[in-house]
Image (spheres, rainbow, N blue to C red):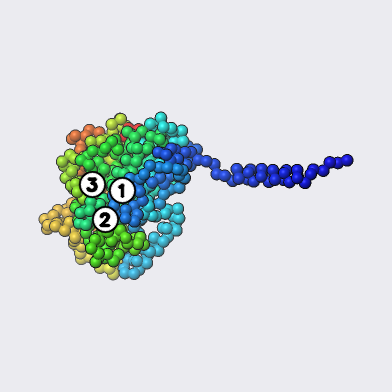
């Protein structure tokens, strides 16, 4: 006689199997818990690549939204609860880029619009938001709280305070370097932030006017950077970093930012950094913050705040889309004004108490190691040294937008311009007028003559340098590129060196001539940055300068 299970027992078995199956399915579907870090009473869950652990999008200050727009960064309360830190935080709002070759009227507007749409579609992972004061930390997977590794605080290579950001592509570089056995902690903040720092740019970070000066809210992007450095000082030990071994590293606007961090607070770093690594950037002669009044007034008028009793307070309440549209209509990096930027650091009486050049003359600068030197002759540095430097042809990238100066006699083919002395002389005069009206309104006739002697129309003397008659995009292109490269990059670097070397022996400088064969661009701005991060023999500059000695 065959025994049959009772209905009750059968139901129990079925329920058991169903429950077991559901449990196993949930376990299989559950994501693998990533590495964790404890900050205050909060737990941050990161992600691991095997070689590195990454903790991304961590807010280091309160979101500068609503009433906090156009205000100094506010301290964030202690962390509580669990945070999933596996995605990069949003970038701060970006200014739309201009097409580098001027086009007339609405055609230029349409091309600019289409190019920015294409850029957005090509980078779907890049999000923008005013809630952007976040920091990204990447560390070796084996690092612990006792590791005390050197730290790189990377002020991202923002496009001269107009655009900035850190993306997944950048993180692959970090993984690549760590994979070579270089132990360090990279703090990447979206001010843009490394440990990557992310900071407010364009109007959001560098609004400038008498109203801004009176309110004490100038240079907000630099204040964001400072707050991110304070965050690193407070928390980086939990990631395996040494808070006393932080090097500020930046390129272009990031390098200028690093240099200005050396000038603020009377040159007192507050122990936030022990060295600086600056590529293609040094303290600029920025002028008073009221010099940006025309752009402030434009934004106020464009957003309907002209009749407000307090225009700055009105701007805090303007819808984001309206403010962003107004910003996009101001001159950008590739506009006709070129490197005479609308949005940049300026002397505000708070972060920068005087013009940076004057502060350097008075030796009001942090006496920390930094450097600039020739990339073809890398030097072994000791525990006290660091680096800053430039490329040979810093100005080429930013000089295409002035090509309508050199397309004088518009009916001629560019080749014929060389054969037409009338057009060439007219071009020379227009270039000199552009330099005077755009950069030096008080330029005397004697100084114009000196400019003509130092920056002749002879294409063999222009930038890209040492390329003879080649790379003359237009008759005046190499002349303008040489002037802009010297004025914005080389001269500030030399002024920094001249005023610090007598009292600071731990200074190195480089001049990179890599990439001279590149048509029209030559050894362009930030090519040294690419060389340092690429898998080339020049990668040796990274562990020597960025991660160990500095």
Q: CA distance from mark 3 to mark 1?
A: 13 Å
Q: Which mark is residue 73?
A: 1
The mark nearer the N terminus, 2 or 3, is 2
Residue 506: where, in percent of width, then height? 25, 33
For mark 2, give the secondary structure: loop
Q: Are marks 3 and 1 in contact (CB under 8 Å)?
A: no
- Specify whether 87 is left or right of 422: right
Q: Are marks 2 and 1 in contact (CB under 8 Å)?
A: no
Which residue is at 31% across, 48% downward? 73
Figure label count = 3
Instruction: Rate crowding at label 3 as few (under 14), some (14 to 19) or many (20 or more) other CA atoms within 10 Å.
Output: many
User: Which residue is more in the foreground, 349 or 318?
Assistant: 318
Which residue is at 17% across, 54% downward? 451
Q: Dot 3 corresponds to which residue?
A: 351
Residue 329: where, in percent of width, then height? 31, 63
Instruction: Rate crowding at label 1 as few (under 14), some (14 to 19) or many (20 or more) other CA atoms within 10 Å.
Output: many
For mark 3, give the secondary structure: loop
Q: Which mark is residue 207?
A: 2
Q: Which mark is residue 96?
A: none
Q: CA distance from mark 2 to mark 3?
A: 14 Å
| Residue 422 in view in this figure | yes
Residue 437: where, in percent of width, then height? 19, 60
User: Which residue is more in the foreground, 121 or 61?
Assistant: 61
Disc nearest the viewer among 2 and 1: 1
The mark nearer the N terminus, 2 or 1, is 1
For mark 1, give the secondary structure: loop
> Which quadrant of the figure contains the N terminus?
top right
Disc nearest the viewer among 3 and 1: 1
Q: Are marks 2 and 3 in contact (CB under 8 Å)?
A: no
Which residue is at 23% across, 55% downward? 212
> Which quadrant of the figure contains the C terminus?
top left
């Amino acid at each position: 006689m065959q025994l049959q299970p009772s209905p009750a027992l059968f139901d129990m078995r079925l329920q058991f199997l169903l429950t077991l199956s559901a449990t196993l399915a949930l376990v299989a579907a559950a994501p693998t818990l990533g590495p964790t870090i404890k900050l205050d009473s909060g737990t941050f869950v990161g992600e691991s690549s095997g070689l590195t652990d990454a903790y991304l999008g961590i807010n280091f200050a309160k979101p500068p939204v609503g009433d906090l727009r156009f205000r100094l960064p506010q301290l964030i309360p202690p962390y509580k609860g669990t945070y999933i830190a596996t995605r990069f935080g949003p970038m701060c709002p970006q200014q739309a880029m201009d097409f580098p070759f001027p086009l007339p009227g609405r055609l230029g507007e349409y091309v600019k619009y289409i190019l920015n749409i294409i850029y957005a579609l090509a980078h779907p992972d890049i999000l923008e938001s005013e809630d952007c004061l976040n920091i990204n930390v990447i560390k070796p997977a084996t690092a612990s709280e006792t590791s005390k590794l050197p730290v790189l605080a990377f002020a991202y290579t923002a496009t001269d305070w107009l655009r900035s950001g850190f993306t997944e592509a950048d993180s692959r570089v970090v993984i690549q370097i760590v994979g070579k056995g270089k132990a360090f902690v990279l703090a990447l903040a979206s001010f843009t932030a490394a440990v990557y720092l992310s900071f407010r740019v364009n109007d959001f970070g560098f609004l400038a006017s008498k109203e801004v000066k009176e309110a004490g809210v100038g240079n907000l992007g630099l204040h964001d950077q400072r707050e991110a450095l304070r965050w690193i000082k407070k928390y980086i030990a939990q990631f395996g970093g040494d808070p006393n071994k932080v090097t500020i590293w930046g390129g272009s606007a990031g390098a200028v930012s690093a240099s200005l961090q050396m000038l603020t607070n009377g040159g007192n770093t507050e122990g936030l950094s022990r060295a600086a690594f600056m590529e293609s950037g040094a303290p600029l002669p920025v002028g008073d913050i009221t010099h940006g009044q025309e752009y402030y007034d434009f934004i106020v008028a464009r957003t309907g705040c002209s009749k407000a009793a307090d225009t700055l307070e009105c701007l805090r309440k303007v819808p984001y889309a309206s403010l962003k549209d107004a910003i996009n209509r101001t001159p950008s990096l590739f506009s006709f004004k070129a490197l005479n930027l609308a949005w940049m650091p300026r002397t505000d009486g708070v972060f920068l108490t005087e013009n940076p050049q004057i502060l350097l003359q008075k030796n009001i600068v942090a006496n920390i190691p930094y450097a600039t030197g020739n990339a073809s002759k890398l030097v072994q540095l000791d525990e006290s040294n660091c680096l800053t430097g430039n490329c040979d042809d810093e100005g080429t990238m930013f000089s295409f937008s002035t090509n309508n100066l050199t397309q004088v006699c518009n009916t001629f083919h560019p080749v014929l311009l060389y054969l037409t002395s009338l057009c060439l002389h007219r071009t020379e005069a227009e270039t000199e007028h552009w330099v005077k009206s755009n950069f030096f309104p008080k330029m005397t006739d004697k100084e114009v003559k000196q400019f003509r002697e130092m920056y002749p129309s002879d294409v063999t003397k222009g930038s890209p340098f040492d390329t003879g008659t080649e790379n003359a995009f237009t008759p005046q292109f190499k002349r303008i590129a040489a002037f802009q490269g010297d004025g914005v990059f080389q001269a500030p670097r030399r002024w920094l060196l001249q005023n610090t070397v007598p009292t600071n022996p731990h200074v190195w400088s480089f001049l990179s001539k890599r990439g001279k064969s590149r048509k029209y661009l030559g050894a362009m701005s930030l090519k040294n940055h690419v060389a340092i991060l690429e898998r080339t023999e020049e990668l040796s500059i990274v562990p020597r300068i960025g991660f160990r000695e500095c």
